[in-house]
Amino acid sequence: MQNATNGRTGRNGRAKVLAVLRTPVGGCSVALLALVIALALFAPALWGDQASAVDVDAIQQGPTAAHLLGTDSLGRDVLARVLVATRLSIELAVTATLIGVAAGTVLGSAPSVLPRWAGRIVTSAVNIAVAFPGLLLALFFAMIFGIGAEGAVLAIGLAMAPAFARLTQTLSAAVAGQDFVAAARVAGAGRVRLLVRHVLPNIGEPLVVNATISAGMALLAFAGLSFLGIGVQAPAYDWGRLLGEGLNQIYVNPTAALAPGVAVMVAGLAFNLFGETVAGVVGARASRPSQLKDSATAAAAAPAAGGGGDRPVLLVDDLRIAFPGPAGRPVTPVRGVSFTVGAGESVGVVGESGSGKSLTALGVSRLIEAPGTVTAARLEFLGTPLLRAPEPEVRGLLGTSLALVFQDPMASFNPTQRIGRQLAEVSEQHQGLSRGRALDRAVERLREVRVPAAERRARQYPHEFSGGMRQRAMIAMGLMGEPRLVIADEPTTALDVTVQRQVLRLLAQVRESGDGSGSAPAALLLISHDITVVAQSCRRVLVMYAGRIVEDLPTADLHTAARHPYTRALLAAVPALDTDRDAPLAVIPGRPPEPGEVTAGCAFASRCSLADERCRADEPDPVNVGAEHRVACWHPQDSTPRSRTSSVDTTTAGGGA
């Protein structure tokens, strides 16, 4: 079965490649490049003698039957010389491109494996070089290396290097932060081995595409230097030199200048079109929806196959997220977070800004980009270890079984694409649906989240939606797959209380109905500043402070059994219906510590009236204080914080911490 799947995937990949090559651009590029290569290989043997034959009786003649494009100042056939010059012109352009790609790749990838100080020097040098126009750099290097073909090759190659270095730098930065590079470094791999074995293979395809396109630019640059007299020197000749010679007799025989110019244009067009075709082929090979769909389906079915009915949808154990800090010391805004989310369960995460709520969600979703790093003793989604599983498997699993609802849907949608097209892309990439079927599914999902006139709305742009409608469309995008977990990060921020309630009801219905087709219920991880919203929407609440979970308890016990001073302070900060309007609102004194300011002891100690020397010296670990209730505090409180009747409905007040 696996062989059959692999064979089908290979056939689909070949079919897509052939489909790209059959397009007008693909067909023209292959035909033109084949013609240029054939001339470069065979023209010197076929027309070499004719190109070098001197005819003193036919000096600077116009087109004739014997000389279709006329002759030069020595009576040599212009057409034959243009054809023969193909080999040297292509050889020099390709050589210069290889030098530029090699130098640029080394310079661009070096900062990712060099020490920080050395990487900054290389990066600064590249940035300065990129600021200069390529032609000026080429002329500068040509003066250094001297007049001639060799100097021109080095000049053009080094002039191309900064652009490739910038591209490589951008691509390699994402790869260098991956765990497999860190593991290779810990295993003792040298810097050169890291570069050759781990970084470059992961950025090869886009470099090849850009190198192919740049070969045409190198061809034009080389012709320019030869035209100026600082490139190829007599008796050798390329198209640029022929163009310069033909310009001297342009009034006598214009075709002598026109022919090499047309040759440069055709060859450059061949390289550029071929580069576009290579880009299309790479995209076709990289886009294998059926393979992603198979891996995602297999991963989603793994819990059922294993018989693990009690296996949580999401298991997080000792999650840590770190970023480089000053003086080489890492900053860890998420420190040792552990929790589970069961099938169909709704869990809320609350805390002040900067407590690590959103970073935790991004870390779970594998959306932390380099130079940030994510580590965990265990990080499993539907039984798949997200930090150790192959990238295609993880991408397919998260793309179909995890739904993300971000805080700002306007920033989450591409403003230049229609809503329906953006939703349909999810099914095209992860489920292998055709463009039409994916768009039909997008309209269906918009209807399910009660977007009126879904077909018309699908053809609109994000700016044509209201805030509440954009949030509904964001939820619909998550439903394009078959979500087993919905992570909603501040989904009601900046919405009025009526729309807040509508969005929360919609999330509750999504959790109960899964993907909208009546399948297994989806779990919900709701992140919010508003502890009242979480209390009304979730079964459990996780209270975060300074990158840690300080209390984990059922929401049914939130108003009567919360034991951490910070949780009680959050509850007290929510205004109630019977709050004295003349009294100042309750606030938590002080401010949360910055991630780089967290020191030994309890992070809340500076704001807590119960803190003592032990609190300032030792950080408490979470301990069980009841059924499904854990708290990290040296002095957990026992008295009832406030009555349940004082909670505020979100339709009448939007209080938050």
Image (cartoon, rainbow, N blue to C red):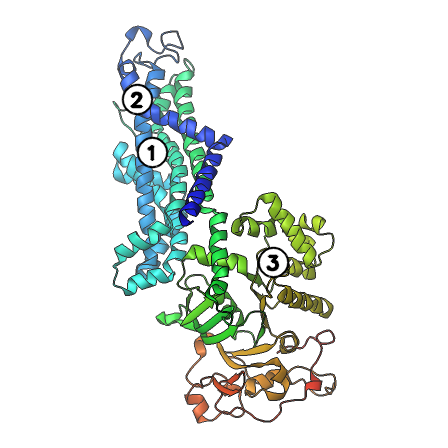
User: Where is 502 relative to 167, above or below?
Assistant: below
Give the side of residue 543 with respect to residue 457, left or right: left
User: How crowded is the residue under tag 1: few (<14 C-alpha within 10 Å), some, or many (20+)?
Assistant: many
The residue wearing badge 2 is 42
Q: Residue at x 29, y 9 (%)?
A: 55
User: Where is 322 relative to 636, above or below?
Assistant: above
Q: Which amino acid, by three-letter code, is at mark 3? A: Leu
Q: Which mark is residue 93?
A: 1
Q: Residue at x 61, y 76 (%)?
A: 539
Where residue 366 appears, x then y in whole percent?
47, 62
User: Where is 255 relative to 510, above or below?
Assistant: above
User: How crowded is the residue under tag 3: few (<14 C-alpha within 10 Å), some, or many (20+)?
Assistant: many
Give the side of residue 650 with respect to residue 624, left or right: right
Q: Which amino acid, by three-letter code, is at mark 1? A: Ala
- C-alpha gap between disc 3 and disc 1: 51 Å
Dividing the picture into quarters, in which one does residue 557 lie?
Answer: bottom right
Where residue 62 appears, x then y in whole percent?
40, 10
- C-alpha gap between disc 2 and disc 1: 18 Å
Marks 2 & 3, CB-CB < 8 Å contact:
no
